[in-house]
Amino acid sequence: MKKKKGLSVLVPYAYITPISLILLTFVAGSLIIAVCFSFTRYNIITPAKFNGLYNYQKLFRDDKLRICIMNTLKLTVIIVPLQLFTSTLFAVLIAARQNTFLGKLTKAALFIPVLSSSAVVGTVWKTILNGGHPVVRAIFGIFGIDPTMLLGSSESAIVTVACIIVWKGMGYYMIITLSSLMSIPDNYYEAAKVDGANTWNQLTRITLPLLKPTLIMNGFLATVSAMQIFDMVYTMTGGGPSMSTTTMVMYAYQLTFKGSKAGYAMTVSNVLMLMVLVIVLFQQRFMRRDASEI
């Protein structure tokens, strides 16, 4: 009897062993390799040579890295609030019209960009904005905007890129929020209507408070995604003009494949990993406090 009980305890571990081995091999292994190579002079072609803390000392003298950190933070600050606002807004609007043709059409239209390749979406938007098509010029001309300058100006390029990233990812966060909205019991709203609560009061007193854990999770996912953005920025601007859209991931890519400085690129990647780790720890602490309040 005791033998059977002991075997049943091991069964759950047997199920998670394959995925645990994959994670250890490809995720933890990659992190360990990146940390080890960050202490070397390595250009991919010749063997790595240990150079101690030189790469980490170089971080403090690298003006380009400071620009890339600022660009990464700017993108994150623009993308995350805009992503949360638009996805929540459309989730609430679609939830009210879930079974109508317009609701289904809007949900499908917003989710289609999520299924598309980021590289393809970036290339299409670059072609649209830089192509100078008469229809595009006419639409932007209504607002007094020259579309060719949206990606061509260092002042507007990062905002334009951020807006397109928000547009592409909106459907993903909207579906998560919509699923959470569907789990809120209808009797909450029925009781609120009996008490005379209008639509705004129902939204601010019932919907948003109950959506708080989901919004925190969406904010966390959007933050990590924004800090690691690469493909869309690369295809739309290539990091320009004048490094105004070069992110930390793109800088690490340039160091590795154009500058033959893979060792230093891994040092930059480790800095980014630490920044993301700090945000993860902050988010977990915030979520635990939020769960205790609920």
Image: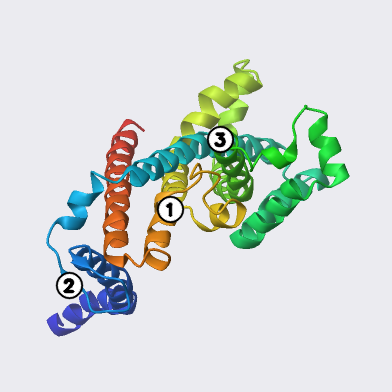
SS state under label 1? loop
Give residue 269's quadrant in the image.
Answer: bottom left
Task: Decide which of tag 3 and tag 1 comes sooner along the chain.
Answer: 3
The answer, for residue 117, to whether it is visible in the render is no
Between residues 105 and 276, which one lies in front from this camera angle? 276
Looking at the picture, does residue 72 appear above or below residue 250?
above
Q: Bin the neighbour count of mark 2 within 10 Å (Cα to Cα): few under 14, some 14-19, many 20 and up.
A: few
Which residue sits furthest top? 196
| Residue 131 placement (x, y as % from top left) | 77, 50
Q: Which residue is mark 2?
A: 49
The amino acid pointed to by label 3 is: Leu
State yes or no: discs 2 and 3 in contact (Cβ < 8 Å).
no
Name the residue: 61% across, 38% down: 153
- The Cα atoms of the two marked residues, 2 and 1, are separated by 28 Å
| Residue 51 placement (x, y as % from top left) | 14, 64
Between residues 243 and 201, which one lies in front from this camera angle? 243
Q: Which residue is mark 1?
A: 228
Between residues 122 and 194, which one lies in front from this camera angle? 122
Q: Which residue is mark 3?
A: 82
The amino acid pointed to by label 2 is: Lys
Name the residue: 54% across, 48% down: 176
Q: Bin the neighbour count of mark 1 within 10 Å (Cα to Cα): few under 14, some 14-19, many 20 and up.
A: some
Which is in the foreground here, disc 2 or disc 1? 2
Looking at the picture, does residue 28 appear above or below residue 140?
below
| Residue 223 placement (x, y as % from top left) | 43, 44
